[in-house]
Amino acid sequence: MNAFDYEAPQSVDEAISLLSAGNGNIGILAGGTDLIAQLKEGRKIDLMLDLKQIPEATALSFDEDSGLSIGAATSCSKIYSYDVVKNHYPALVDCTSLIGSIQIQNRGSVGGNFCNASPAADTPPAVIVLGGTCRIAGPNGTREVAAEDFFSGPGQSVLQSGEFLISIQVPTPAANSGAFFLRFIPRNEMDIAVANAAASVVLDSEKTTIQEARVAIGAVAPTPLLVADAGAALAGKAVDDEDAIEAACAASRAAARPISDMRGTIEQRIHLSGVLTRRAIQGAIQRAKES
Amino acid sequence: MATKTEDYLGITDYKVIGTRPIRHDGVDKVIGRAKYGADIDMAGMLHGAVVRSPHAHARIKSIDTSKAEALAGVKAVITVEDLPLQEDKIEDLGEGAANLQHLRANVLADGKVLYHGHAVAAVAATDIHTAQEAADLIDVEYEVLQPVLTVQEAMKEDAPLLLENQTTESLGEDTGQKSNVCTHFRHELGDVEKGFAEAELVIEREFDTATVHQGYIEPQNATALWSADDQITVWCSTQGAFTVREQTAQILDVPVSQVKVVPMEIGGGFGGKIRIYLEPLAAVLSKKTGRPVKMVMSRTEVLQATGPTAGSFIKCKMGVDKAGKIVAAYAYMAYESGGFPGSWAAPGAMCIFAPYNIPNVLIDGYEVLVNKPQTMAYRAPGATNAAFASETIIDEICEQLDVDPLEFRLKNSAREGTRRADGPVYPRIGNEECVKTALSSEHYATQLNGKNRGRGIASGFWFNVGLKSSAAASVNSDGTVSLVEGSTDIGGTRTSIAMQLAEVLGIRAEDVKPQVVDTDSIGDTDVTGGSRTTFATGWAAYQCALDIKEQLIERAAKLWEISTDDVVFDNGTFSSSDSSKTLSFKELAGMLDETGGPVMGRATVNPSGVGGAFAVMIADIEVDTETGKVEILRVSVIQDAGKAVYPSYVEGQMQGGIAQGIGWALNEEYAYNRDGLLTNASLLDYRMPTCLDLPMIETHIVEVPNPGHPYGVRGVGEVPIVPPAAAIANAIYDAVGVRMTNLPMSPGEVLKALWAKNGENGTA
């Protein structure tokens, strides 16, 4: 590991001025579960900017009107231990409680998971199907970007020089709705997704028809993907319409454009996109029925 | 030295053996006080880093160390030029052997790099970050060559040669033929062609198994101090301090007496911590700087550059007659050696058909160079690959004959007097007892229900080894005994060895204070490997206790002014026909000064009465046919321990072996890309099982005493890793009807097999 400077700004403004003034490579530190590992593997930075002293970056709050606000550096375990999340956002529990190990979950954050922008990241699909947005601070003020538009390639996001992610906003779930996330890994923990998927549905008051649905898949393209065709295939269909669910799975398979690597092959990942989409939809419908 | 089968004492009512006392090293390990190699810190200590090859196969054209040497804080840089030249000589490592030229070229590449991660140079600096930065500044110019990654590729006549002077030794003769095939050997029993001709049913298949890692948690490390008087001290994590001393002295070309090896606590070895890697580098860097030099591998270095165990290609064929008796068996076993000769086909060949009585057997073994790290032992090395092949074939035979797989194994079981294809005739063994125990187990009697669920059975054998061990002990005036030994304690052997001494002397295990000491403080002792330590070092402790007992009888006789023949020692008490004359061990221990001074016992052994070990596994699994993932539902392992000295440790070995075997079966593999670069050199992507991947592993200890050991002990550490891959493959077949012939049986591979059978739509 090379020598670098370390700063822990106390406010968003201070962070922005440090980012603007900073020369060379800056590494933004939240939980450090990616950054520190990368530094040990040879990534070189000149300045490490620790967000954890900025109140907005570690906040976790809920308001019926504005929904859930997750500070970018809020740890996964804080998120899944929060009663509001347990009761109203079970899909966020699904993803935050299976990343790494308990030790990793105590440090790692959803914001960091977004900014690291791994195609196989486990939190983006759930945030995408929940209609989440990313609140980005920069020299020209704050802007919001839909979660599905945050990613631009492996390890790359829409964050511009001088910007950083402050928080992730997730709207209050609609009545009669449910969401579900799952991934496929060869072992049962401590692994990187071969493929993952999330789905959300809003049912009618009878809970027999899907009014609206969103499906997102991960680890099967350069970025996490919102599969609009899958959602469209389900909208207006009965919850037990197997053809509609199969059409959604086919839409996920069609949207997937994976690579082969030591974690999985193209064929396996395309196939799993369909399998996981089905299981995510079924899980989301089940939760909506129980809501 | 007593080594015959008559040595078994036939004792059944033990006082200490078979109990579960608190282990002597338990407190230090639980509270974190135990000292491992990475804990070492000394005044003036430097930190070393290694420059490693980014290529799998390349010629080194030049090495420029000038920029590294110019960096502030760098104290020394070395390449292979700094190691003395070696003659072409074979060094026995206790478990495996090494040619010294190859050992030297493995610790620092000599003209060629033969695998991704091969060490090329080393640096010592004032801190680890400076050392690593300096390592990055060393310019190595390579001429990249085509890598050879599988035995099938490497055996082709036009394959690129890894070692230009390597020729094939075939059936004991040097053929003079330049080749990547280092060795071809053969075992023959009866007439295999005649056997197959007489067979009613013949099954033949080919099997591929991946290169796998032992998975010890603690990375390799070494700290060395080359003193101004040329005395060299090495602190390291090793399975055998004496083999480290021998190898280090040879590589440095100094007498063994100039090297003292201090074995630190060890965080696992499983066969991977026998060959040296860092020790000579740290020593030479210390010689150059006059300061102690510490080197600790990263996990990536461990995976890239230390010895994994061999991947293999095996063809196996077996024939049975109408009565369901195996009449012939053939195996072609080609094992990877890695970048230098020496592999594990030979032990694999000793094990492949070992649980069975087969009149006609032919085995051809090959050890083949490939551009991967030089392979090393891994728990029953070679036997898991072998059993994966033979036990899968047996399962298919049972399926075709429609016979119970355990009944078939019982009917064909090897027993006392059966000759193995590689020569030995078995003394009393416990294979039949293991199979019978499996047959009568509650697990086997419980039906497995449910879709895509299946049960698999497999047997395994490991021969175990004896080798040299030494022990010395002194009687303390408070009635305790201090025991020193040279065997690295990996699986609780301080206690299992101390218990054998305590049994003789009629004292408690807690009254023995065992210590593992450095190479200047005890007689030569071979590695903790080959499942030998409780057997052989335990035997040394037993002999050592007999020595003490004899001396104490003399002291009692002197005290009582009677003949030694009139002193009786029983259950910790010395007595004579005169009932007023009795002394406990403790009382007599307190009277040593007045009867002639201190009493010490000593013993060295090199026993040959090794008892082979057998195990049977029952595995219940479920396949997710949409993802190909195999879930382990329930597992039982049945194993003959001879005599379980410390039953909890025997159970621990059984569970550990099964756990590692499950990893080998399902997900573990070195993933090399086309260029021969290791793409999963981390424990994230080298997928060993975690707690969540394993069920509670049920253990059944069978005790058929080994007639070749005074307490009937057999080695227990290795055999449980032999059956799992085959048992799980057989269970997958039972569940979903596909025969998996490649390891690992990862979800992607199972899915492919299901697609081949049912078509993708059949499962989606």
Image (cartoon, coloured by chain):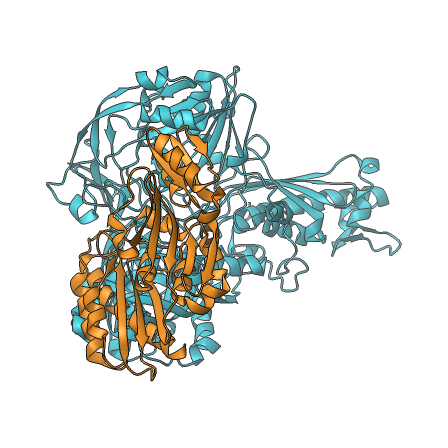
> Which colour is chain A painted?
orange
Between B75 and B476, the one nearer to me in the picture: B75
Q: Is residue A26 above or below residue B635?
A: above
Query: Residue at 19% across / 53% down in the picture?
Result: A259
Spot occupied by residue B600 in the image (x, y as percentages of width and height):
69, 38
Between B17 and A123, the one nearer to me in the picture: A123
Location of the C terminus of chain A by quadrant is bottom left
> Which colour is chain B painted?
cyan
Q: Is residue B204 visible?
A: no
Between B585 and B426, the one nearer to me in the picture: B585
Q: Is residue B492 visible?
A: yes
Query: Residue at 60% across / 62% down in the picture?
Result: B10
- Which of the 4 quarters of the picture holds residue B599? top right
Spot occupied by residue B635 in the image (x, y as percentages of width and height):
43, 68
- Which of the 4 quarters of the picture holds residue B396? bottom left
Residue extending farthest to the left is B158
Q: Is residue A216 left or right of residue A171?
A: left
Marks counted in the figure total 0
Q: Is residue B60 above or below residue B510?
A: above
- Which of the 4 quarters of the picture holds residue B100? top left
Between B700 and B675, the one nearer to me in the picture: B675
Q: Is residue B141 above or below residue B439?
A: above
Spot occupied by residue A151 in the image (x, y as percentages of width and height):
26, 50
Spot occupied by residue B649 in the image (x, y as percentages of width and height):
55, 57
Q: Is residue B315 left or right of residue B226?
A: left
Location of the N terminus of chain A by quadrant is top left
Q: Is residue B290 above or below residue B21?
A: above
